């Protein structure tokens, strides 16, 4: 395939080939390696790799860095957050019900819920959300110029640099604060590593989940039988969430690697230095794995989808995202059974120009 930058790369579309590539250590996630596929014209900058933290690291550095923070994302740890997430969701739905109609679900629910959750987890003040939400959407948008994306990145970096410095002076009991204490004890993480980690978690932690809340709500509103399925039996919600994750595969264009040596995949030789895209959406609609793949089938078992990637870089926040989505959909349709879309689907503005698919605004009434 030819990328918007004119660069050529391979595109993997089969579920099995994507899984094989993403677990093959001969492919590198290092964005600064020559040949790494880029969707935007941008020279590789070593500083950028550091800023992207885990997502741009290879073994053994990646394993070490991921283990440092993995304890914060265990299922048990995240389950402890469930009551607080429920409270955040309840409050935002109540506020929406108190406000004018139609309401924009993106501003009322989709964005604030994951933003508040990631802020509390990291120890970043939610009062700054206008700042970091606007900068992360600028960074995600492919229609912004390189300069605009660069300055959004710069501003987020400086923000996190100050945040981490404050925690280095007075460690707080939150994810970044605990990492600061670990850094003192083990010396394995530098200040720049912590800034990179905070940056990655802050931007990866809200925009993606927000998009899934909006798209998932729209999908439910178009299918009353899906709403009935989770309302009658909330034990089905986790499986429905997996199917929604598969069906939309919102972070499709962000899984890329470059071959560090010559490798053969599905009988095709990929040479060292050539870029490869793992097209998660294509893999998630591979008819060999998901029959009738373009149907949203709430009775399907879709857990082996690729919406969170696969292999060592598989999404660190996936269980947090799952809990948030499950709580939002269960609560939304329980509290507002007559929620209705207040626009025609064809008039909605979808994010076709961003690294993560989504909707810019979702007008609803009840
Ligand atoms: C529905 C929501 C989400 C989707 C669809 C999603 C998708 C993904 C995908 C596809 C990757 C793999 C990238 C690759 O292989 O190059 C990834 C990695 C990652 N995600 Fe998510 N993500 C979501 C939510 C979150 C949340 C809530 C957090 C943080 C709290 C998060 C943090 C991360 C991190 C840190 C990585 C990098 C892991 C590594 O390289 O070891 N994500 N995500």
Image (cartoon, rainbow, N blue to C red):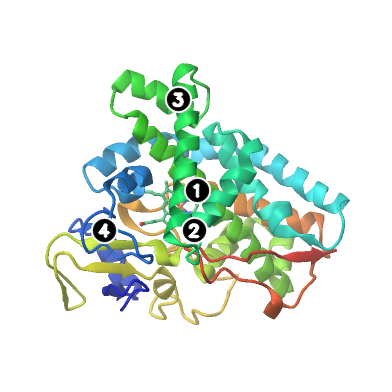
Between 280 and 46, the residue placed more toward the observer is 46
Neighbour class for label 1 at 10 Å: few (<14), some, many (≥20)?
A: many
Q: Nearer the viewer, mark 4 or mark 3?
A: 3
Q: Are marks 1 and 3 in contact (CB under 8 Å)?
A: no
- Counting residues from the start of the chain, the first of labels 2 and 4 encountered is 4
Q: Are marks 4 and 3 in contact (CB under 8 Å)?
A: no
Position of the C terminus by quadrant: bottom right
Between 200 and 264, the residue placed more toward the observer is 200
Gap in angstroms between the C-alphas marked 1 and 4: 25 Å
Residue 140, numbered label? 2
Neighbour class for label 4 at 10 Å: few (<14), some, many (≥20)?
A: few
Residue 165, numbered label? 3
Gap in angstroms between the C-alphas marked 1 and 3: 19 Å
Residue where numbered disc 1 is placed: 203
Q: Is 90 placed above or below 14 here?
A: above
Residue where numbered disc 4 is placed: 23
Q: Nearer the viewer, mark 2 or mark 4?
A: 2
């Amino acid at each position: 395939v030819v990328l918007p930058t004119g660069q050529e790369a391979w595109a993997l579309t089969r579920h099995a080939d994507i899984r094989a590539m993403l677990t093959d250590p001969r492919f590198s996630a290092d964005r600064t390696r020559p040949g790494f596929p880029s969707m935007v014209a941008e020279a590789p900058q070593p500083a950028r790799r550091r800023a992207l933290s885990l997502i741009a690291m290879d073994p053994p550095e990646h394993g070490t860095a991921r283990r440092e923070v993995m304890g914060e994302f265990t299922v048990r740890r995240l389950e402890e957050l469930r009551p607080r997430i429920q409270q955040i969701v309840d409050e935002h739905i109540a506020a929406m019900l108190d406000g004018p109609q139609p309401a924009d679900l993106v501003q009322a629910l989709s964005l604030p819920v994951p933003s508040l959750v990631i802020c509390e987890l990291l120890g970043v003040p939610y009062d700054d959300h206008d700042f970091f939400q606007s900068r992360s959407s600028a960074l995600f948008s492919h229609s912004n110029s390189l300069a605009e994306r660069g300055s959004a990145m710069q501003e987020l970096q400086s923000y996190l640099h100050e945040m981490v410095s404050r925690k280095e002076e007075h460690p707080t009991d939150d994810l970044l604060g605990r990492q600061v204490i670990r850094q003192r004890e083990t010396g394995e993480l530098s200040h720049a590593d912590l800034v990179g980690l905070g940056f990655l978690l802050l931007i990866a932690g809200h925009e993606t989940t927000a998009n899934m809340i909006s798209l998932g709500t729209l999908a439910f509103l178009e299918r009353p039988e899906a709403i009935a399925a989770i309302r009658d039996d909330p034990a089905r919600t986790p499986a429905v969430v997996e199917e929604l994750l598969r069906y939309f595969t919102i972070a499709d264009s962000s899984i890329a690697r470059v071959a560090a040596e010559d490798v053969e995949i599905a009988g095709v030789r990929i040479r060292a230095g050539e870029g490869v895209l793992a097209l998660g959406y294509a893999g998630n609609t591979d008819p060999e794995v998901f029959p009738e793949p373009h149907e949203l089938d709430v009775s399907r078992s879709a857990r082996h989808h690729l919406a969170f990637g696969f292999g060592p870089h598989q999404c660190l926040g996936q269980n947090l995202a799952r809990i948030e989505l499950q709580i939002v959909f269960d609560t939304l349709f329980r509290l507002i059974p007559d929620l209705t879309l207040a626009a025609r689907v064809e008039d909605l503005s979808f994010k076709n120009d961003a690294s993560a698919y989504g909707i810019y605004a979702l007008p609803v009434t009840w």
